[in-house]
Amino acid sequence: SMATERALAWRQDGRDDRFYDIDFRAMQADPIGEVRGLYAWLGEPVSDEFESRMHAWWKANSENREPAPARDPAAFGLDLDAI
């Protein structure tokens, strides 16, 4: 889309320090760790209470989550490593 193209161009023009990337697979593997990394990048603390609440939220919400169907990106002409 045009918005994505503009954002990527803006980022490539030397503004990469204004972006924090979180890999989807990393977020799935360790969501609390990824949030900790984001907060560290922002210079914000993660208190024990905050982390405890994140763990509680994740546990409560993951119990009701429907399993995602496995999809092969190649079936859509995509290379997962290139995305």
Image (spheres, helix red, strand yellow):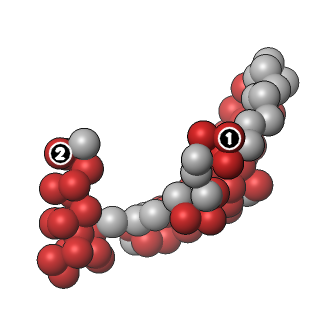
Q: Mark 1 belongs to which amino acid?
A: Ala
At x 79%, y 20%, the residue is 66
Q: Residues within 10 Å of mark 2 (few under 14, many from 20)?
A: few
Question: In terms of secondary structure, where does tag 1 sit?
Answer: helix
Mark 2 or 1: in front is: 1
Q: Quadrant of residue 75?
A: top right
Q: Relative to residue 11, is residue 30 depicted above or below?
A: above
- Residue 39 visible at all: yes
6 sits left or right of 25 in the view = left
At x 53%, y 58%, the residue is 83
At x 23%, y 75%, the residue is 12
At x 76%, y 55%, the residue is 29
Image location of residue 64, percent across then percent down: 79, 18
41 sits left or right of 4 in the view = right
Image location of residue 51, percent across then percent down: 66, 51
Q: Relative to residue 55, is residue 34 depicted above or below?
A: below
